[in-house]
Image (cartoon, helix red, strand yellow):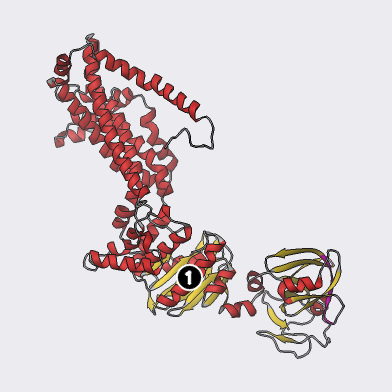
Amino acid sequence: MSIEIRDIGKRFGDFVALDGINLTIPTGELVALLGPSGCGKTTLLRIIAGMESADTGQVLFAGEEATHLHVRERQVGFVFQHYALFRHMTVFENVAFGLRVKPRRERPAEAEIRRRVMELLGLVQLDWLADRYPTQLSGGQRQRIALARALAVEPKVLLLDEPFGALDTQVRKELRRWLRRLHDEVHISSVFVTHDQEEALEVADRVVVMNRGRIEQIGTPDEVYSNPASPFVYRFLGDVNVFHSRLQGVWAEIGRPPSGGAAAASAGSGGAAAEGGIAAPVATDDDAALAFVRPHDIDIVRAPQAGALQATIQDVHAIGPSVRVELAHESELIEVELTRERAEILALRKGEQVWLSPRQVRVFAVPSGGEEFVSGSGI
Amino acid sequence: MSVAAARHVLPGFRLGMGYTILYLSLIVLLPLAAMVFKSTELTAAQFWAIASGERALASLRITFGASLLAAMINAVFGVLTAWVLVRYPFPGKRFVDALVDLPFALPTAVAGITLATLYAGNGWIGRYLEPLGVKVAFTPLGIVVALTFIGLPFVVRTLQPVIEDIEPELEEAAATLGATRWQTFARVLFPAMLPALLTGFTLALSRAIGEYGSVIFIAGNMPLISEITPLLIVSKLEQYDVAGATALAVVMLVISFVLLLAVNGLQWRLANSRRAGARA
């Protein structure tokens, strides 16, 4: 079933939790609402579920008005961050709950309930825990039971509120893949809330990035990662080096003279492409600008070269498969991430002078008049 | 399993256990033992004659009957009160919350006199009940009212922290699964409260069984009708019939003990069935 959200707004006192949210979730898609805490993503999920009512706007399920439908009648499955399992019931009874509370004429027979519950427990691969109590289960198991419980009533929509938030990294990763596989199996329209960008990018068909009650960008994981629509999205999806500068100075700042042969920049949305030169979108020279470079999009070289920026190595940490180098360029701190192999070849030492050559840069101009960002990217 | 042999984080198991036993012996066991010992001055036949006397039996019936009824009333309304106090914000909430403790603090005699005055035929409440044919003061009903009054805080205070611990998400989860409000209460909330409710019920019941001060003012104390066992014991003592008084006390003690043991057993089974589940 598709979900359509039209112009939803919600305030808590003076705090604007949601501001004019429009979103369509097609049938069968797994969508992630991604954003920092307090961005309104959970509120939006709760409004979809009917646990919270919106001040303005509409929620439509399969094209039908559902804004004022009671939670009970919405046929949504909801999975909570802290599981919300019924502690005094066995795992079996937890999953059977939704079937047992049905009105008598809709309620399946005991044998049918048993069959359905065991089938669901099989789906979440925990049928051997049917007689246990929730307190005897690990966090990951509990969340899977919570999911089975939500699926028992055959909801039209599945909503998950930070489903893996309370679990440790290892279990989280496992459950992430498992959820993806499960979704491919049951194919139910699902929305899950997360503040973990990796989780959103890995699991979702589409990612909705939210900030301060507004949607910043909607797109596939690849789109939002490689083509962020705003500085916020850029910052939120992974580490990034930000250079504050004047638009004209951007290239100088990051070591690329406007006429430099290597510099080929193309403007992003709203800007005109400029071959072999600076991305000069609508904004004029000397407007404030922000240049974004991901740490892994920078290479370190020993010799000065066109488009490279000189910096001093301050620290070198090996973190798992990659090596993180902290460098200082004038007063600015720059982070660079190298592969282990590359780091070994370079054999970097603290205090060394090196040159940084960016592989991909994205520039967001701040026009002096307004807040709107105009973007351009250099490759 | 040997408890003492197991390693504990905190030292001093032996010392702690020793003090506990000594303390309980001095405070609880010794006086009770002395009482039982005193009652052995009577022969079995004498003991039986006192314990099964018409007046004694009637008083036991009224004591335990009224106490059970009062504890049940408190269980029902205690749940409601505790729920409202925890879940809903309303003006004057702190004041109402403090009000709950008053029956603890008020001298029971004061409570008894106040209730008797209120419920008497010419009292503020009694004057409206009397024409309806409901007599409260100086009847067994009055005893129930007094015992309900003094037992209220026990249920409310034991339930409050438990209700605070029930996450609102449980209700939301039940609602998304299609449960009505009533089903949510009966199947999710009430079972979560039940162990604490039993504890509160037990406390209110024990308190009611031992209550003396408030009851004697409102009960009317008519032998065979509204006379409670504690009063009978006191009146025996006033006649210097110490052995007779201890005999009645021992009977009360045994019944109370069996009653409490039964409730505790129920509670233990409840907790156990939940915890152990299918550990085998």
Residue B78 percent location from the top left of the image:
32, 41
The quadrant where residue A317 appears: bottom right
Residue B206 percent location from the top left of the image:
30, 30
Q: Is residue B168 left or right of residue A379?
A: left
Number of dots carrying numbers:
1
**Image quarter (top left, top right, bottom left or bottom right) of the N terminus of chain A:** bottom left
For the point 29% across and 33% down, which residue is it? B261
Q: Is residue B127 left or right of residue B165?
A: left
Q: Main secondary structure of the magenta part?
A: strand
For the point 49% across and 69% down, which residue is it? A192
Secondary structure type for disc 1: helix
Residue denoted by label 1: A178
Residue furthest to the left: B54
Whether residue B221 is visible, yes or no, is: yes
On whether residue A249 falls in the magenta region, the answer is: no
For the record, the magenta segment spans: A306-313
Tell me the chain of label 1: A
Residue furthest to the top: B240
